[in-house]
């Protein structure tokens, strides 16, 4: 199918009426609209994969939040997620942004349940910064400390061919991240996928610009490898001396 579709009635993706635990595929260049707070009810374990398409959220009167509630939304590099004046509540859910994906929501809220933000790198250049979220808020018991402590920031190096560099991953560009400091940010969970050789990379929080950046570190050859190299050179020299 083509054109705009409503969540629960769309026919251009599978399944047409998602429930907890389903894998939802949105592709073919279409736009699917979630009307209301659907994932607040059926989000647990829902895997939404958007490829070359658009996922939007218009909300309903009096409901301006999008509760992901344990769902995972993955956007490939040619997809977008938007909600205009609405804000997204991570609530233990996962967001996957492949390089080139875009998002446009008013705010993002992380509570004590936390969640995960994954950024997929591609090629030798920097990551296309996610700039569509206006503010970052925290709620639930424990406030910002508990929210960040239960949140995971992940970088997937699959497809990355670049070297050491620093670039922004996500920018809450209207400047609200009340209470979040670099020290608190460093209590989050950080991990790297497909990152052999990049394990020394680091996430960084800038509480002036409200951005999360990544410093990619490409380690020098290990001392063991260097020692083996020296042994090989020494053996070669010795053989030449005897010849």
Image (cartoon, rainbow, N blue to C red):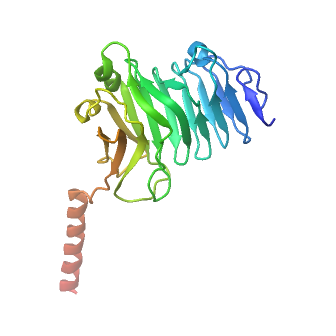
Tell which of 176 and 156 is nearer to you: 176
Task: Name which residue lies at 22% across and 57% down.
Answer: 224
Residue 119, image x, y percentages: 46, 42
Residue 206 percent coordinates (x, y): 30, 41
Q: Residue at x 47, y 29 (%)?
A: 107
The residue most toward the right is 1
Direction from residue 76 to residue 174 in the image, left or right = left
Residue at 46% across, 37% down: 118
Residue 195 percent across, percent down from the top left: 39, 47
For the C terminus, the image quarter is bottom left
Give me the residue at 54% from left, 23% from top: 71
For the image, the number of numbered tags is: 0
218, 40: nearer the viewer: 40
Q: Is residue 10 above or below residue 210?
A: above
Q: Residue furthest bottom?
A: 243
Name the quadrant containing residue 165.
Answer: bottom left
In the rendered view, would you say 37 is above or below 235?
above
């Amino acid at each position: 199918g083509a054109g705009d579709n409503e969540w629960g009635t769309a026919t251009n993706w599978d399944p047409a009426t998602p429930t907890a635990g389903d894998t939802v595929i949105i592709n073919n260049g279409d736009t699917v609209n979630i009307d209301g707070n659907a994932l607040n009810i059926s989000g647990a374990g829902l895997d939404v994969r958007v490829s070359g398409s658009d996922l939007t959220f218009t909300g309903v009167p009096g409901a301006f939040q999008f509760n992901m509630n344990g769902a995972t939304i993955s956007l490939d590099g040619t997809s977008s997620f938007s909600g205009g004046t609405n804000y997204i509540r991570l609530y233990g859910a996962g967001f996957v942004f492949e390089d080139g994906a875009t998002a446009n929501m008013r705010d993002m809220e992380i509570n004590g349940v936390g969640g995960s933000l994954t950024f997929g790198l591609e090629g030798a250049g920097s990551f296309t910064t996610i700039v569509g979220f206006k503010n970052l808020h925290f709620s639930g018991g424990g406030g910002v400390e508990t929210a960040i402590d239960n949140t995971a920031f992940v970088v997937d190096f699959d497809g990355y061919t670049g070297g050491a560099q620093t670039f922004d991953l996500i920018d809450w560009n209207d400047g609200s991240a009340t209470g979040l400091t670099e020290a608190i940010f460093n209590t989050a969970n950080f991990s790297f996928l497909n990152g052999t050789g990049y394990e020394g990379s680091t996430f960084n929080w800038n509480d002036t610009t409200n951005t999360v950046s990544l410093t990619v570190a490409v380690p020098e050859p290990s001392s063991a490898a260097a020692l083996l190299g020296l042994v090989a050179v020494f053996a070669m020299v010795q053989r030449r001396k005897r010849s």
